[in-house]
Amino acid sequence: MRSPALTAATRFGLGPEPGGGPSREDLAAELDHKEAAIVRGPDLATLREAYVSADRTLRTAARAFRQGGRSEAAEMARDDARQARNQIMREAEADEIAARYAHGVTTRHPFLERLVLFWSNHFAVEAQKVPVRVVAGNYEREAIRAHVTGRFGDMLAAAITHPAMLLYLDNARSFGPNSPIGRRRGKSAVNENLARELLELHTLGVGGGYEQADINELALVLTGWSGGMEPRARSPVFDRRWHEPGTRTILGTRYPQKGEDQLRAVLDDLAAHPSTAAHIAGKFARQFVGDDAPDDLVEALRRSFVDTGGDLAELAFTLIAHPAAWVDEPAKVVPPYDFLVATGRALKAADVDQRFIRRAAETMGQPMWKPPSPAGWAYKDTDFLGGDSVLERVDFAGIMVRRYGKGVDARRLARSLMGDDLDPFVAETVDRAEDRHQATVLLLMSPPFQRR
């Protein structure tokens, strides 16, 4: 059985740490660092202004190309405008990937980073659409990191009203029949995607007590929340011209508020709903302990969420304070991105080309900010073991060791990272390796780096 220190480093952190890992008290102390999990980068207003300006130029050039006989000069102008817009996307994405990885490798608060990764996956967005790719990293910084030790209700509001979420789940162009836009066009275009996922994934959970009528009403509440990433937008986030007016009834509660206030009132109630507490508690326990996390741990988390009004620092403290979180043998496979960061931490390799990081995450099966669905990555105990996943990890570890671990003594590193927890079989395997390169790769592929 792993010692509490190695359990703390692997189950609640980002991999084995020199000296064997933090104590339970060290983990608790991390929760006091309110700003420690925030990676600095361009703010949303800066990104939005740059993208909207470039997108407006592209639309103008594309219109001129269509209306001007599709001349060669107009075609070149259109293509140049598209390249300029896409360059903004590529630069934003590259900067965010590099910053996220470097922070993960260098942070002295790995428990906080694990919490960021959990909540970012809970409020998952997929960066496939160009405007989402521009702001996906900002979304994690401003909507998730900024609230990771705050209150769930604040994170919920920040996530749901961020352009990344509004664009990803097709709410940006949703408008009601009685909105100014709807009356002018004589129709409506209400999209239910965000409303459905808000109830099913982000708050109440499946079986949380909502019905289709609640989804319909919530979708109307969400009309007008566009994110401001299109040239037509008159407001950074909420545009009254697209909002369906009127009182809405959701889960039996009437919401007579107008405009932005209506959604904020609904989100406050959803954050405080008993089903939300139960949904979050179960998911939190399964993520950190395993698919078979004991009921008493889940109940303790649910009670903490209710009693503290969704205080996320207290929720995390309740997790590490509960005996059940420490006793079981490692059950969960370390996800590819987490392994990527653990490898960087072990080799002290923070300055790694973001293109390699992006390709490595994709090759190992977990591309950054590109989950398979709005539900995010499943993170079940045996996920990420299919196909050639083990071979891909070996290849990645080999490249990292060749580039950043040439002088590493794997035997010394193994004893530094695991101390008395060093498995004799792992020690023997490392000792018998053909050379330093192979020894370090074998260490990185050992259970403490692959299971938590």
Image (cartoon, grey):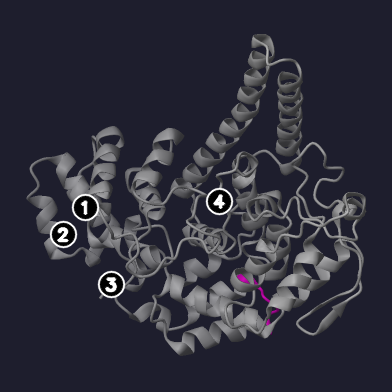
The residue that label 1 is drawn on is 443
Residue nearer the viewer, 337 or 35 = 337
For marks 3 and 2, give the CA distance. 14 Å
Residue that appears at 81% across and 57% down: 188
Label 3: element kind: loop
Q: Which mark is residue 2?
A: 3
For marks 1 and 4, give the CA distance. 33 Å
- Judge whether residue 311 is colored magenta: yes
Q: Earlier in the sequence, mark 3 or mark 2?
A: 3
Q: Earlier in the sequence, mark 1 or mark 3?
A: 3
Residue nearer the viewer, 446 or 88 = 88
For marks 1 and 3, give the CA distance. 17 Å
Q: Is residue 260 left or right of residue 43?
A: right
For marks 2 and 4, give the CA distance. 38 Å
| Position of residue 69 measured from the top left corner of the image (x, y, whole percent) | 72, 15
The residue that label 4 is drawn on is 126
Q: Earlier in the sequence, mark 2 or mark 4?
A: 4
Magenta stretch, residue numbers = 307-312
Residue 9 visible in the picture:
yes
Q: Earlier in the sequence, mark 2 or mark 1?
A: 2
Q: Nearer the viewer, mark 2 or mark 4?
A: 4
Within the image, what quadrant is residue 272 found in? bottom right
Mark 2: which amino acid?
Answer: Val
| Position of residue 379 measured from the top left corner of the image (x, y, whole percent) | 42, 65
Label 1: element kind: helix
Kindly report the secondary structure that dominates the magenta region of the rendered protein. Answer: loop
The residue that label 2 is drawn on is 426
Mark 3: which amino acid?
Answer: Arg
